[in-house]
Image (cartoon, rainbow, N blue to C red):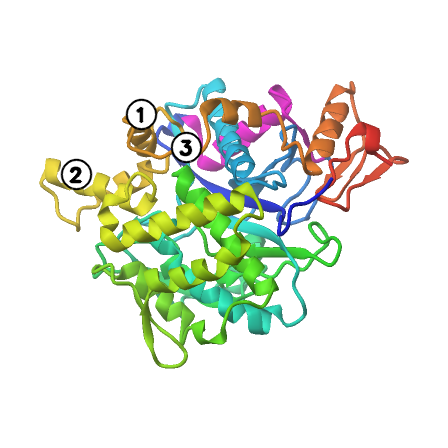
Amino acid sequence: MGKLPGERILGLETEFGCLVMDDQAGSAEEVVETVKNHIFHTQRLGAIDVHARDDVFEPAQSGGFLINGGRLYVDAVGSHLEYATAECRGLRDLVANDRAGQSLIVRALREVGLSEAASFYNNSVDHFGGHTFGCHENYLIRADEDFLNTSAQLLYPFLVTRQIFAGVGRVGGHMLAAGGLRPSYQDMIDNPVDYIWVSHVYSVAPDPGVQFQLSQRADHIIKTIASRVRFNRALINPKWEHFYSHDGMTRLHLLFGESNQNEFAYALKVGSTLLVLRLLEDRLVPPHMVLAQPLVALREVSRDPTYRWTVLLADGSTIGSVELQRQYLKLAEHYRGSSPDTDWTLEAWAETLDGLERDPLAMGDRIDWVAKRRAVEQYMAEEGLDWSADALHSIDLEYHNIDPEKSLYSALDEMGEVRRLISGVDVVTAATDPPQNTRAKGRSQLVELVLSRRAPRFYLFDWNGVALDRHTYVEMSDPFETYEHGSMK
């Protein structure tokens, strides 16, 4: 299938928190298992893995690929539910497929009778436990061996400052201290999943000096690049593997990101990042944009109560985050006209930066951190609270409830205070229909084929290929090909 200039494969992975309000419903881990099993065994919306993808992290029966092209599974690290979107080529397909994954979880929770006892959240921080959850972005890029040494330095300024429109907002903050209590030998024996990849353990404490910040994850990022990310979280996690690799291209896995409730912010985050990666491929980003200390700037931008968001460049000069984003935007104008998504992104990017420059707090219809801050401040005014009240963390959390009947974000949507990118019909369709222009379509057909069998004993699904039995393997190396039944070889 033909590609537009600069067109890439996109995908997101979201880790969901589960909160149980009724002890009779069981533990959070038990609720997660119940929901997962209902989706695969009762609703039969996917082919559950009959093999272990990883003996520790993803043993057999942990999850599998769905008929909508996505993948739902229980990650053994924290026993949380995780949804990975299908491979997508367009922003609207990506948002719809992502929201469809959430709708499947909500529907399953209702059908098993636990919707009043438990909730799932796409937030990215545990205010009291100090944990952080991921929303990881994946981009197919054309990267040479020098990407992580040179080009990445020109990506960090964009990632650090894009939180001014992509951040989901957070009440309070955390302080990290190196050299926390390291696990004993017995701890590691008793909890192998938690410690098998630990290369650095830190302690976490609330930071009383922060009232509100742009990002939920900025306080927890301690490396620019890291391959082992348990307690060692980074901006980028290299994933030079074959699942997305094709025709000289490979997958870039971005760890610093959060799950946007607002569809406009979601699409702008991904669309602008895609254009910046394209600029890096074409070597069009000038070296003067390198930051002096990316991780320091990350936290300073997130925590700046003045909204000036000034960062220090490697040459000793300073620049505001809006202006730095404008420089990336100006460079990206080079690609105007190459696709409808490109043109939408350029217009939305310029419009958003203009709005942030005029009045950041007037951007609540398209930026999550603004909408959340306004909701928190309204609650404070109604209840006579200040920023030290623990109850504010509950408001923060409920903004991210993925059940539309409970979510504070969804309440804003119902009041017409949110800019939408897709419709409810798009989400319903994406719950069962994969994107029509990637290999997710062919894989979806094979999932349905396996589900139609009375008692399949052997099959194996992966992103880049499917074994239907011990003698039939369908290779899907090209993510841009649909691999429909008529074209399968």
Three-letter amino acid code of the residue under disc 1: Glu
Identity of the residue drawn at 35% across and 24% down: 405
Q: Nearer the viewer, residue 318 or 382?
A: 318
Three-letter amino acid code of the residue under disc 2: Gln
Tell us which disc is closer to us: 1 or 2. Answer: 1
10 Å crowding of disc 1: few (<14), some (14-19), many (20+): few
376 relative position to 335: left or right: left
User: In this orientation, does residue 206 appear?
Assistant: no
Q: What label sits on residue 217 in the rendered view? A: none
Q: CA distance from mark 1 to mark 3?
A: 14 Å
Specify the segment rendered in magenta.
Answer: 25-49
Is residue 354 positioned above or below 480 on the image? below
Q: Element under label 3?
A: loop
10 Å crowding of disc 2: few (<14), some (14-19), many (20+): few
Indicate the quadrant where residue 385 lies: top left
Percent from the top left, x then y, of residue 163? 37, 55
Three-letter amino acid code of the residue under disc 3: Ile
Q: Which residue is mark 1?
A: 414
Q: Which residue is mark 2?
A: 378
Of pointers 1 and 2, the one earlier in the residue sequence? 2
Of pointers 3 and 2, the one earlier in the residue sequence? 2
Identity of the residue drawn at 34% across and 63% down: 323
Percent from the top left, x then y, of residue 483? 77, 35
Q: CA distance from mark 3 to mark 2?
A: 22 Å
- For the N terminus, the image quarter is top right
Q: Nearer the viewer, residue 188 or 103?
A: 103
